[in-house]
Image: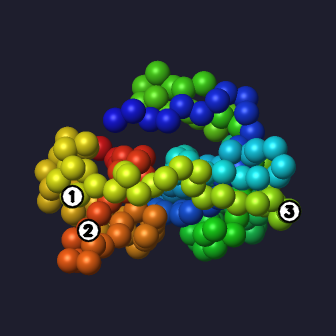
Amino acid sequence: MTRYSFTVGNAYAGKLIRVASRPIENDVSLSLQLLRIEFMIYWMQDGKQLESQGEIACRDIVVGELIPADCDAGLVAYAHALRISAPINRRDNWLDLPPSSRWIEVTFGPSEKEGGRNPFDKVAPFDPKGWTVKDYRYDRSAQWVTIRAAADAADVSESTVRRHVDALESRFGSDLIHRTEGGHRRIYLPLFMNVWED
């Protein structure tokens, strides 16, 4: 899969779409929690317009009692940008964030050699008030595909795609899946490939 490469140094707006617990292999008695924060990325266009092309960017953070929250510059930056209530090292303060109502401004760094992701170089609070939000600037209708076509694109079995789509449907809804009159699912391939995790 080819990942989207964001322009280094450009400011983008990111709308929070989810904060989720991730598996972690450390001793559970250590009270550490790995969290994934996912954002829909928007281009900041002239005329105060935010435009999305369906790209999603995410970051993983670790929170817990062992994390010295006020000394961790990375954690403090995300907490400030997302307006997290204190204490910022408390897991529930992150998981309770309301999706789609929290925005950040993000600047990306150069793509990493391993995995090809652009790291977040800077994050700051962002208020979309006064901006026009345009979710997609291209015709999506030509890129809806069958389960089989999605499986071919991801190089996995159709049953794997079905399981993955079942898990993603509650998060992305009609942006990812629609049903034909006969009840067959069609998957929006660009978004599916963007959120696919090997």
Q: At 57% across and 69% down in the image, what residue appears?
A: 95
Q: Of the residues shown, which amino acid type is indicated by label 2?
A: Arg
Q: Position of residue 53 (x, y in %)?
A: 56, 48
Task: Report crowding for label 3: few under 14, some 14 to 19, many 20 or more residues within 10 A (C-alpha).
Answer: few
Q: Is residue 156 above or below residue 92?
A: above
Q: Of the residues shown, which amino acid type is indicated by label 3?
A: Gly
In the rendered image, is residue 62 in sight? Answer: no
- Which one is nearer the viewer's eye here, 72 or 194? 194
Say which residue label 2 marks: 185
1 and 3 marks in contact (CB < 8 Å)? no
Task: Report crowding for label 2: few under 14, some 14 to 19, many 20 or more residues within 10 A (C-alpha).
Answer: some
Q: Of the residues shown, which amino acid type is indicated by label 1?
A: Ile
Q: Earlier in the sequence, mark 1 or mark 2?
A: 1
Q: Earlier in the sequence, mark 1 or mark 3?
A: 3
Secondary structure of residue under mark 1: helix
- Give how far apart the Cα atoms at labels 1 and 2 are: 7 Å
Say which residue label 1 marks: 147
Q: Locate the N terminus and report the quarter of the image it occupies.
A: top left
In the rendered image, is residue 151 in sight? Answer: yes
Q: Position of residue 62 (x, y in %)?
A: 55, 51
Q: At 25% across and 50% down in the image, what residue appears?
A: 150
Q: Position of residue 23 (x, y in %)?
A: 38, 56
Q: At 73% across and 29% down in the image, what residue appears?
A: 9
- Which one is nearer the viewer's eye here, 174 or 116? 174
1 and 2 marks in contact (CB < 8 Å)? yes
